[in-house]
Image (cartoon, rainbow, N blue to C red):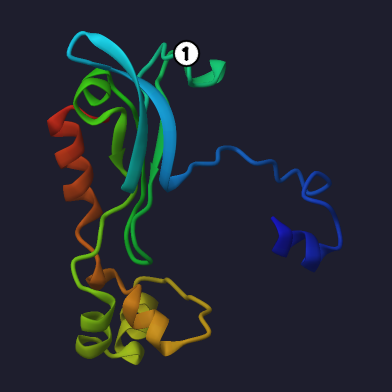
Amino acid sequence: RLAFSKVFSKTSEELDMHLVYDVCHNIAKIERHEIGGGVKTLLVHRKGSTRAFPPHHPMIPIDYQFTGQPVLIGGTMGTCSYVLAGTEKGMSETFGSTCHGAGRALSRAKSRRMLDHAEVLENLKRKGISIRVASPKLVMEEAPESYKDVSDVVDTCQDAGISR
């Protein structure tokens, strides 16, 4: 929104660019969860995951009470993304957590060793995707090949019942 405001010399409100939803991941939060029949206060650290509370949970905004907490699952530069929601099973089995993306298939170092930035850019261009990036290193580290298949990851979360 800031970039658009700068380019068009208007505020995000004047451009009708309102924040739809914001989500945190890789954080620690103090929350209350049921454990062994009793409710306990816990510090829940979500590394590689995000909060996904089910419908009717008191900690989610009224707008999402019937659907559950939205979970944005980002794909890669070359794949789709998903919007999921939390479930009761996820609450009981994962403290209301689910994935926040596909997850790396290759380390950053291995991506830099195995991939050629020009080839990654060409593959994206063939899909109609253009990117603006300051560093060839970053292109290789964030290439679609560096990540797991996001659809497989989402299917696994849904099959496990921790998000839908």
On screen, residue 144 versus residue 64, left or right, reads: left
On-image quarter of the C terminus: top left
Residue 132 placement (x, y as % from top left) = 53, 78
Q: Which residue is mark 1?
A: 58
Between 87 and 10, the one lying in front of the other is 87
Q: Residue at x 41, y 80 (%)?
A: 138
Can residue 10 be seen in the rendering of this structure? yes
**Helix, strand or loop at disc 1?**
loop
Residue 162 placement (x, y as % from top left) = 22, 29
Q: Residue at x 22, y 49 (%)?
A: 151
On-image quarter of the N terminus: bottom right
Between 36 and 55, the one lying in front of the other is 36
Q: Residue at x 20, y 57 (%)?
A: 149
Between 121 and 51, the one lying in front of the other is 51
Dot 1 amino acid type: Pro
Which quadrant of the view contains residue 45?
A: top left
Q: Is residue 57 above or below residue 162?
A: above
On screen, residue 61 versus residue 7, left or right, reads: left
